[in-house]
Image (spheres, grey):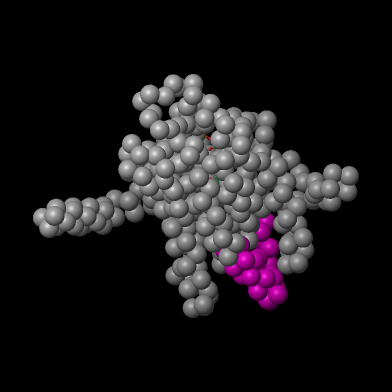
Amino acid sequence: MYGNDFAATGEQTDDHAVDEPGRVDARDLEAQFQAIIDGDGRIEPRDAMPDAYRKSLIRQIAQHAHSEIIGMQPEGNWISRAPSLRRKAILMAKVQDEAGHGLYLYAAAETLGADRADLLDLLHSGRQKYSSIFNYPTLTWADMGAIGWLVDGAAIVNQVPLCRCSYGPYARAMVRVCKEESFHQRQGFEILHSLALGTDAQRAMAQDAVDRWWWPSLMMFGPPDDASPNSAQSMAWGIKRFSNDDLRQRFVDMTVPQAEALGLTLPDPELSWNAERGHYDFSEIDFTELFEVIKGNGPCNKQRMEHRRRAHDEGAWVREAAAAYADKQVARRKAVA
Ligand code: FAQ
């Protein structure tokens, strides 16, 4: 899944790979890379790639991986208070899925030469980002519905095009992630559906959650296109396939009819169908909030990072035990050989 090139160092199996890297001119390597990108092919771990491409992918994949593991916290908060055994089992499975997504993504970053421990250090020291959305609190059970429906819904819209990303291991990881996110989105919709058809208090709780999560979900797509420094190059390299604003619009168009089906409203008086554009119009987004949250000033940034660092420290013994076990297996194999 992470790389489909399993040859030993020095042997190349891929027809677009370099036979003898030491003997090939840097311009040829660049041309080979560009030819794969132009032909909408996949770059694999052993292919030559410009440093900037490698760095940008590590940046995005690491941020994505960090988002998945920090993203376990807001919902983890409700596992012990889920309203039934069925809801609890589903929520536990979902939160575990997010951990799994983080692992696929760290593994994808490793195929680019990044070290997982270094990436975690960068997260813990605040030098690498994670998604803004996970810095908001989960105040009621209905937030589990709103996160599944809106946050996982936005994640799907953003990530389905990444299944065609030019870097093979990231694209393949995304296929699996998106399948699981679809289940997450449906379970969120189902929670809200039950609440929306429930008592007046349950319905009010569902509406309140949607009111709080709507704007942060739109901000997940990133800054507007004219303030998105990475987009142009990422799109030229086939990492991103659509701009932040195009994906945001796609999410709005997809979500409005679903809100109608739930009988809930979205907190935007300017939301209306524009027949000429063939899209829903919506109010201007307050991006100062996004930039503040990214800078560390969101409602839960401090709490999320403290929890993450503590979990990492408390898990040190597990990593040490796993490393000691692996060393023992290697020593045993050597002794037998
Ligand atoms: N939050 O130039 P752009 C999930 C940063 S996973 C924080 O537009 P780019 C699953 C950006 O990194 C959610 N930072 O950047 C789940 C850049 O900073 P840098 C995560 C943000 O890369 C569900 C700077 O601003 N998904 O939800 C945000 O072209 C439920 C300038 O921005 C992914 O990571 C933000 N919202 O586009 C889990 C998907 N937006 O790096 C649990 C993959 C922007 O230059 C429960 N990533 N920034 O220092 C992407 O598609 C892209 O990286 C974007 C940003 C679209 C996020």
Where does the image place residue 15, in percent across and percent down from the top left?
48, 39
The image quadrant in which ligand 1 is located: top right
Above or below: residue 200 compared with residue 236: below
Q: Is residue 70 left or right of residue 282?
A: left
Outermost residue to the right: 276
Foreground pick, 15 / 91: 15
Specify start and end residues of the magenta stretch as a single range: 184-212
Res 335 quadrant in image:
bottom left
Where does the image place residue 246, in percent across and percent down from the top left?
71, 42
Q: Give the quadrant of the C terminus.
A: bottom left
Q: Residue at x 59, y 46 (%)?
A: 164
Foreground pick, 238 / 19: 19
Magenta span contains residue 162:
no
Q: Is residue 248 left or right of residue 136?
A: right
Majority secondary structure of magenta residues: helix
Q: Residue at x 73, y 55 (%)?
A: 254
